[in-house]
Image: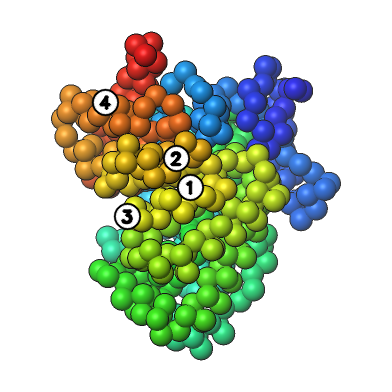
Amino acid sequence: MAGTEAIGDGDVGEEAPANEGFANGYTFFRSFRHEPECFVPTFPPLQNDLILRTARGEATERTPVWMMRQAGRYLPEYQEVRSEHAFFDVVQTPELAAEVTLQPIDRFPLDAAIIFSDILVIPQALGLEVEMVSGKGPHFPNPVETPGDLERLVDPDVDDTLGHVFDALTLTRQELEGRVPLIGFSGAPWTLMAYSIEGGGSKNYKQARAWLYRHPEAAKTFLQRMTDVIVEYLVGQVDAGAQLLQVFDSWAGLLGPKTFRTFALPYLEQIVDGVKAEHPDVPMIVFAKDAPYALESLAETAYDVISLDWTMDPQAARLLVGEKAVLQGNLDPCALYAAPDDIRREVQHMLAGFGSQKHIANLGHGMHPDHDPDHARVFVEAVREQSEQMRTVS
Ligand code: CP3
């Protein structure tokens, strides 16, 4: 392989490129993004492709580890950035998004970076206003209340509306200098629809769930509109430098087996099939939170990795999923409030449950703002050390 690495290509390169195009490559990409045939960005060679090999189902020397919401409020350096910039300003400014993405990578020996953004950029691209209210979370001043409100949605030019995420990915990939792969992501249609109808977080999302029974056809129209944008968005993320993709269906647990089959699964499938039609080699992770009933059907899809929340027993999940998919997860984030030795013991229990292969270690959901960064370090280091030991013993 030449000194630079093509996008989405996980091979470990041998020599670093004379990377004078660092800043230039980024500026170049911004100006040529509309004509991708004219310019394909190149990146420093990857030094750690452990998570990519694991995601593809290959046997590896240790279990890779990253943490959902690893860039965020529990890090004082993130708080410092946020004291000067509003949340969506950080998301929309590639230099800031790249800086925040790298913060946990500079601190902990993680095996992947995840681009700093939010799942709610998709409803925003469709024309819905979303505010981030500090201490409360997302708020839609004008939610989608009736099927007639769908007429307010626009058909976005993904490059124009979400190009800032593509730029952030390209810049971050440069600044990572090949240390670890970069994960891109999107929310899943059902979860995004739930937020858009409910107007923000909610106890039981009953308005969104009521739509599935009162307006099933309009619900499908809404889900399809989002799916089409998400496919283009994720393909664009890979073009811009993402090497692995995760789809967050954080509110899958509000559905039941029947509504999941009708309103979530077909769209999750369209997403993986649509992205893989363009980028067959990019591994894809699906996270359907609180939805053990969904495991068997997710295992039938083309997703390479199924992410589990902490309510699922790894061995029971493996029996349901079979041997094909890789599993990700699933330490209860609240275990990080325990003393370091207890965290190490919980990690040992988790690793024993998943076994030494086909597992990406993670939390069962995201970091909390009041987590101690030192405890996150204990988690990451314990996975590295213990998973290596597991292989020498077995
Ligand atoms: O994981 C990472 O480090 C990358 C960044 C990331 C954020 N949000 C940053 C963020 C990712 C992957 C997300 C995904 C996301 N956003 C999900 C799916 C994952 C999950 O938690 O289930 C969801 C449901 C959202 C929607 C969202 N964004 C909520 C509910 C909130 C507020 C809740 C809270 O934690 O306060 C956000 C805001 C948000 N997104 C923050 C961060 C760091 C905190 C905002 C702040 O800085 O004030």
Circle 4: residue type: Gln
Gap in Å between the C-alphas at discs 2 and 1?
Answer: 8 Å
With respect to residue 213, does 170 lie above or below?
above
Task: Identify the disc placed on residue 290.
Answer: 3
Gap in Å between the C-alphas at discs 4 and 1?
Answer: 26 Å
Identify the residue under disc 2.
Answer: 322
Left or right: residue 30 versus residue 339 is right
Gap in Å between the C-alphas at discs 2 and 3?
Answer: 19 Å
Gap in Å between the C-alphas at discs 1 and 3?
Answer: 16 Å
Circle 3: residue type: Asp
With respect to residue 135, does 314 lie above or below?
above
The answer, for residue 324, to whether it is visible in the render is: yes
Depth check: give the residue in front, 252 or 17. 252
Task: Identify the disc placed on residue 348.
Answer: 4
Dots 4, 1 in contact, CB < 8 A = no
Identity of the residue drawn at 56% across and 68% down: 226
Identify the residue under disc 1.
Answer: 299
